[in-house]
Image (cartoon, coloured by chain):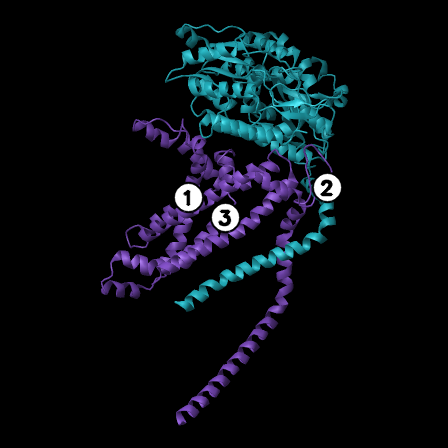
Amino acid sequence: MSEVIDEDVVDVAEQRVIDRADELRRLQRREAWRRRLPLLPALLFTIVVTQVPFVLSLWYSLTDWTIVPPSPREFVGLENYGELLDNRFFRDAVWTSILMTVSSVLLSVLFGLGLAVLLDRKFFGQGFVRTLLITPFLIMPVVAGLVWNTQIFSSSFGVLNWFLDLLGFERIEFVTRYPLWSIVAVLVWQWTPFMMLILLAGLQGQDSSVLEAARVDGASSRAIFFQITLPQLRRYLELGVLLGSIYLIQVFDHVEVITGGGPDSTNVPYFVFQRSIGGGWQFGQASAYSIVVVVASIIIATFGLRTLSNLLEGETP
Amino acid sequence: MTGRHGRGRRPWFLLLLLLAAVSLVAAACGDSDDSDAGGGDGSESDASEAGDDGGGSSDGGGDRSINVAIVGNPQMEDIATLTPELFTDETGIEVNYTILEEQTLREIVTRDVGAGGEQFDVVMIGMFEAPQFGANGWLFDLNDFAADTPAWDVDDIIPAVRGGLSFDGGLYAAPFYAESSFVMYRQDVLDAAGVTMPDAPTWDELAEIARTVDSDEMAGICLRGKPGWGDLGASFTTVLNTFGGTWWLANDDGSIGEAQVDQPEFREALEFYVGLIGDAGQDDAANSSFNECLSLYQNGEVAMWYDATVAAGILEADDSPVQGLNGFALAPTKVTDASGWLWAWALAIPQNSPDPDTAWEYVSWATSEDYINAAGEALPGGWAAVPPGTRESTYANANYLAAAEAFAQKTLDAMLAAPIDSPGTTPRPGLPGVQYVGVPEFQDVGTRCTEQFSAAIAGSTSIDSALSACQDIASAVSN
């Protein structure tokens, strides 16, 4: 019996403690908002200022604005969006964008991970090698595209074809024969260092005592990597994939410089360019396309991240 | 683990929330912004006007300067190097050149001229744009200026060229050089192979010669394969015309009718073109246009080249490695009598140029007989390298005829033969044109279709799918 009473007393006391904690939390939250309130106008201002171009595009996307031949700008409602679904070239561009983004993000994460693991070890000249590896990311996209196009891929002056020649193979016109993969190759080359840097930060943030303990317990390097290091890296991988997707879905420079558009290399940004200032002069339509890209970027980033998250959760012990 | 999980997830949710909030705000603002967007044009051009005044380029006085956009072809690069000495020293007008690739120049100029920018005082446009821009009211009518400048003899301009740059009696651009297309070939290579080129070959004869002289070291023929309506589009359309095909039928009112890309003639022309490049064409054909073919030909890597007549002046210039080795023949035909194109690069003054009089001073110098004479003396390439095809006086100039003996008459013949009024076997929509259709929509359709054709040349897509894609692209603009 006494045990029961005791339990009740404990329960009541516990309840009181919980209540007080709740109260405290509520107060804290109110206090926090009171402190943030003066910042709200600034936040609103920032949102308005940064979103004006987006709002203008939104408006243009509802008009049939064309400058060649010049015509009055008229409101056409959602017509541009309706046409978009029927347009096989837009669908092609979407597909190219997806392939281009997914493959370059995944490949650069993969290579970046490999390089990061190698760089995580101590060796002579580590800093120098790291600097060398970062360089591709620091090169302007247009320059990178030009260098690859004229000096590496080119069938007359390119290094790759010189090698093929040397080995007795036929020359390959990389850019025109495999437009998509040529662009992906350059993107991977440029973005691997970025992924490497992020993942390297993750690797170096590992608790070395945990790794040591695992080693003492007789875990193999493989097991340590997959069961300790990789889960630890998850947040860094997420970050890399997220930033990579957001940037790479907007790739324009590489397409312009390397192939200048065409089947298998016109991605959505290039398509938007072509419909608007690149000869199509259909600003209304092009705005509609670009709005779709914004929405798609958000969706793709969401899905990509969630998938990766689930994938890694499965491997967590 | 769960604790860390929670923490890991939170910033992500915040980000999503923020994005959602942003798009809500954006949507909400959409309505109130209507009037603003409508007036956007006015305020934009006001702003750029203010910016230009701040730049202080047109105040008159000693340090006048103008901005000129030109195509990066050899003759244009020549004038850019000669300008400081021949023009600025005389007049005190500083000329800032922006040299661009053809396709880029078109985009920038159309945007600048069409949307009311004031980036350039003088722009270089082609025969395709001049009458269209003139009709849109975007350019000054140069006849008004020419009336006050007798030294710039407007009647000396070759009539076909003048006609092509005019609309409704107004001359909207001054020709810098003009050209047709013809076949250039290495006489020594053909002699060694024991073949002779007729003066007016057919495409079948030309293809046979190309396949005969083609070898591992030297391709039989260089043909444009780079996407762009003015690149592959120009060469291919002359072939298409003479094969009896066309891009669109014309409606009675001259507007764009049914697309004809799915017709057998179109397929025959494309198969011929792609097949010839595959059998006897240059390496990396899908990537080459005028400048690439020029360098291949000068390096001795191709035996023949079908392209603009203006190239002949560069091949026969004093500093050319193939000077004196070349023969020239009219553009090849199939079912029509003549197939060469007609083109001019010309200088125009946009309506919103801040200082049209200074601009005209430059234009009337750059396109004058005097410039041609001065260039003939000053250029390392000599007289053969002066801008050809614009003035009758050039073809009466003894110095020029001596240096350009091999091709001067052939160029003139080709230009006169260019079937500007009836390039194919069917009437076409829009303004006259040989290697293009004179409607604004052709720019976009031509470029996107030639992307498909170029991919077919490279082998990354099939002729069937290129044709079906192109038919869809062309159909989208027909009425």
Q: Which residue is mark 1?
A: A188
What is the quadrant of the C terminus of chain B in the image? top right
Q: How far, Cα to Cα, is label 1 from label 2? A: 43 Å
Q: Amino acid at mark 1?
A: Val
Q: Amino acid at mark 2?
A: Glu
Q: Amino acid at mark 3?
A: Tyr
| Labels 1 & 2 near each other (Cβ < 8 A) | no
Question: Which mark's residue is nearer the viewer, 1 or 2?
Answer: 2
Color of chain A here? purple
Question: What is the letter of the cyan chain?
Answer: B
Q: Does residue A5 appear left or right of residue B415 in this picture?
A: left
Q: Does dot 2 land on a helix, a strand or a loop?
A: loop
Q: Does dot 3 land on a helix, a strand or a loop?
A: helix
Q: Does dot 1 land on a helix, a strand or a loop?
A: helix
Residue B309's x, y, as percent?
Answer: 56, 15
**Residue placed most toward the observer, A168 or B244:** B244
Q: Does residue B248 appear left or right of residue A262 in this picture?
A: right
Residue sitting at 74 percent across and 49 percent down? B35
Q: Is tag 2's residue or tag 3's residue first in the polypeptide sequence?
A: 2
Q: How far, Cα to Cα, is label 2 from label 3? A: 33 Å
Residue B49's x, y, as percent?
Answer: 71, 40
Q: How far, Cα to Cα, is label 1 from label 3? A: 13 Å
Residue A83's x, y, as percent?
Answer: 62, 40
| Labels 1 & 3 near each other (Cβ < 8 A) | no
Q: Which residue is mark 2?
A: A74
- Which numbered marker is on residue A256? none
User: In terms of image quadrants, where is residue A153?
Assistant: top left
**Residue placed most toward the observer, A243 or B53:** A243
Give the farthest residue toward the front.
Answer: A1
User: In terms of image quadrants, where is residue A135?
Assistant: top left
Please report, as a chain letter, where disc 1 is located.
A
Q: Which residue is mark 3?
A: A247
